[in-house]
Amino acid sequence: MELRQNISLTAYNTFGVEASTHFFVRIASTEDAKEMVASGTLAQRPYVVLGGGSNILFTKDFEGLVIKNEIEGIELIREEHDWVYVRAGGGENWHRFVLYCVEKGWQGIENLSLIPGTVGAAPIQNIGAYGVELKDVFDHLEALDLSTGELHTFHKEQCEFGYRDSIFKRTFKGKYLVTSVALRLRKKPQLNTSYGAIEKTLQEKGIRNPTLRDVSNAVIAIRQSKLPDPKEIGNCGSFFKNPIIPKEALLPIQQLFPNIPYYPVEDGQVKVPAGWLIEQCGWKGKKVGKVGTYAQQALVLVNLGGAKGEEAWQLAQKIQKSVQDKFGILIEPEVNIL
C-alpha cells in the first residue's frame, strides 16, 4: 500500500473532468485495506472510495484521500441443485464479471450487461436495467469498516435495498469499503426478455430461442445504441434517477400531459422516465458551453471537450429546475457530486 500525493483524477472519472486529489492510494486486497486503516491515514483527512469512476462528478479538486478499490478475482463458493453462489472482488469490473457468468451458463445478471463500474459499487447503488436489479440475485457482501478495520458480512435484508439505493448510500455512506460481493445465480436459465427492446432486438436478429449470450448481446446492442462510450464522449451514464411518485400525484399531471409515460411500482406508486421529462423541457441534444445532453438520450449529460465538473453540475441544476417548474416533479441525481 503506497500513499501517493497530488494525483490527477482525469483518468479515473468517466466524465473526463480535470480534477486532482491531495492523496491517492490503491487497495488491491483486504490486507491492504486493513493496513490503510491501521496506519491512521483515514483519521487525518476526508476520503472517498472510488471504483470505476462512472458514477461520480468531481466539481473541484478533492482535498483529501481517494481510495481506489482494485480488489479483483472471481470464484465459485457453493453449488446446489439449481443454484450457484459466485463471489467477485469489489474492484472487479462489473461487465467483465457479467460476461464470465454468461460464459459459465449462470443466469441472473445478463440483463445488467455493459453497466459501467465495479462489482463493489453494484450493491451500493443497487444497479438495475431491463427488468432486473442487483437485489434480485444478491446473497451477501463483505465490507471493511473504515473506522475500525474490521470485516463485516451484510446479507440482503441488512442492505435495505431500494430503487438505486441501499443502506450504504444512507446510514453507512462512506463508512465501508466493499471487498467482495456474492450472488446467487440459476444453473437452469429463466430468461427475462420482456422489458424494453430486448424482445424486439432478438427478433430483428432472427433469434427465437435465445441463450444467455443472446440476451446479453441484445442488451449490449441496445445500450450502445442509446448511450455514448465514455472513451469517446465523457459521461456518467444516466445522470438522474427516474422519479417515483404517488399515483394520485400523477393524475393532475396527466390532465395537462395525457401522454406522460409511467410504470406502476409497489405501494401505489409509479415510476416516470426522467429522460422523457427532460426531453419535454427541450433539453435533449442541447449544448451549453462545453457540456450538454446526449442527442440519443436526454438522461445523459456529456462532456463536449475540456468541461469542468462545475459546468456539468450547473447544467444539471438548470434541468432539475425546468422539470420541476413544468411538471412539479423533482428529479434527483443518480451520480455522486463531489
Image (cartoon, rainbow, N blue to C red):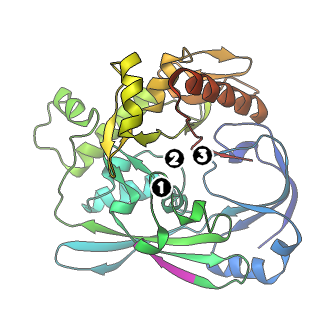
State the quadrant of the N terminus: bottom right
SS of the residue under disc 2 = loop
Q: Horizontal and vertical percent for residue 302?
A: 62, 28
Q: Position of residue 197 (x, y in %)?
A: 27, 32
Using the image, determine if residue 60 lies above or below residue 120: above
| Badge 3: residue crowd in 10 Å (few <14, some 14–19, many ≥20) | many
Visible residue check, residue 140: no
**Callout 2, which amino acid?**
Pro
Q: Is residue 129 left or right of residue 176?
A: left
319 vs 224, nearest the viewer: 319
Image coords of residue 182 (percent x, y): 41, 72
Q: Which residue is mark 2?
A: 116
Q: Earlier in the sequence, mark 2 or mark 3?
A: 3
Q: Residues within 10 Å of mark 1 (few under 14, many from 20)?
A: many
Check residue 94 in the rendering and tell me which mark sits there, or answer none: 1
Residue at image location 17% in from the left, 56% down from the top: 190
Q: CA distance from mark 3 to mark 1?
A: 11 Å
Please give the residue where the numbered disc 3 appears in the rendered image. Answer: 54
For label 2, the crowd category at 10 Å Cα-Cα, with few meaning under 14, some 14 to 19 and many 20 or more, is many
